[in-house]
Amino acid sequence: MTPLLILGAGPAGLAAAEAASRNGQRVILIDENPEPGGQIWRGGAKRWQDRRAHALWDALKARPGVQMRFTTRVVAVAGPGQLLLVQGEQTQVQAWERVIVCSGARELLLPFPGWTLPGVTGAGAIQALIKAGMPVEGQRVVVAGSGPLLLAAADTVLKSGGTLAAIAEYRDTRALAAFAGKLALRHQAKLAQAIGLFARLRGVPFLHGAIVQAASGSDKLGAVQLLHKGRERIIDCDFLACGFGLVPAPESAALFGCAIDNGKVTVDAAQATSVAGVWAAGESTGIGGVDKALAEGRIAGLAAAGFTASRADVQARERALAFGALLASTFPAPAAMRKTCQPSTIVCRCEDVRAGELAAHASWRAAKLQTRVGMGPCQGRMCGAACTFLYGWEATSPRPPVFPVRAGALAAMSYENSVEK
Ligand SMILES: Cc1cc2nc3c(=O)[nH]c(=O)nc-3n(C[C@H](O)[C@H](O)[C@H](O)COP(=O)(O)OP(=O)(O)OC[C@H]3O[C@@H](n4cnc5c(N)ncnc54)[C@H](O)[C@@H]3O)c2cc1C
């Protein structure tokens, strides 16, 4: 039997691979990154502080039926039961019968004047850049936007020697206090985590009810302009890390024809998608954090290997889904960012399309045809979600190939003799 493919080696993929292989299932774990861990555990085992990551990884390394393929991207369907994989210059057609899609999420980046200046990043993106070696020592950093990822990003900056000039959260003190109260009732471990982060960030100016208006600088970022409780504030900085939460990354599931609703891969109680033989787990099915990814990964891994999940896993998923719903209701994308985006603001940075060119169109499709929005290398991964927020358009998933590939890689799809059984 063809091994079970697991697409994505973040928490969901690692948990799925562990649960499936624990029961003797052969597994191939594929990820585009050079090391396992996905977003939250980015950077490989030497950086991990979460014991759950080490436990999963140690178990997987010890199992002979588990094969890992890193720096490998799944880019397209190569034919019935076949996927096209790309690793550097190499391409391969991989047969599949069952697959678990654990493709994660990406940041919601909302456009504002100056957001394309060098020095402006997403909140999660600055973490990824720092973990990849970008130095911030001695640099002044403002972390802005909305949601708990701001605190995690600020913590990473501080630990790496950066100076936090401010953390600017859109939600006001009352909304944050209500959020903390709800955490205390049902998610005490998350509250403890948040208290720990606040303790480490003691002394950093934390502005509640503040929103980014613009980033400025000549050839790179020099300052950020915020609106805080009705007053304008300008803060000099070298980096602005600005994010508004996460959106699922469903395009890998879309390759298999899985149903997607409101940007999330649709799954049933066993994490099965609408397509037979395809399961999905983690942030691609909806945003809920690492606990949701782990619980869903375990349930999907067991289901794909022919087993039923334990009651404890199902309860862990329920708790994590409730946390995801609380996050979504507390930190929706701030409506005020629609006003901040000016007609001259670039929305699609691949194709340099500005908001003023987009506003006249009625749909994502019409705008794509007329302006080339979403038709550059990122295929609308970034500007698609921004256009949904700004104009209410349903931005469809990137078309295959879901990542830019060389023409030669696509030609490989017809080489049937390269199919690995
Ligand atoms: C930028 C960023 C930073 C984050 N930082 C934190 C944090 O500090 N703290 C926190 O609690 N949460 C953080 N999160 C939330 C985090 O996504 C979840 O908590 C957790 O990592 C979700 O696990 P997952 O397995 O569902 O997805 P991920 O961890 O995102 O793993 C998905 C993996 O699939 C790979 N992949 C996707 N498509 C393909 C493909 N076609 N071919 C090959 N590989 C593919 C991705 O590269 C990735 O490695 C962050 C999210 C983002 C987007």
Image (spheres, rainbow, N blue to C red):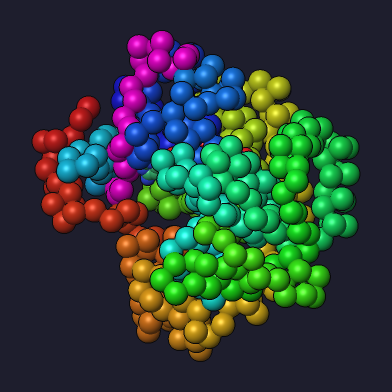
Magenta region: 58-77
Residue 66 among magenta residues = yes
In the image shown, does 303 or 376 lie closer to the viewer?
376
| Displayed quadrant of residue 312 | top right
Residue 46 among magenta residues = no
Q: Can residue 198 be seen in this view?
A: yes
The x and y percentages for residue 389 are: 60, 70
The x and y percentages for residue 99 are: 41, 35
Query: Which residue is at 49% across, 47% downward?
Result: 136
Q: Is residue 383 visible?
A: no
Query: Which residue is at 50% across, 79% downward?
Result: 345
Query: Which residue is at 13% across, 40% downward?
Result: 416
Depicted 287 relative to depicted 407: above or below: above
Quadrant in which the N terminus appears = top left
| Displayed quadrant of residue 281 | top right
Q: Is residue 221 left or right of residue 175?
A: left
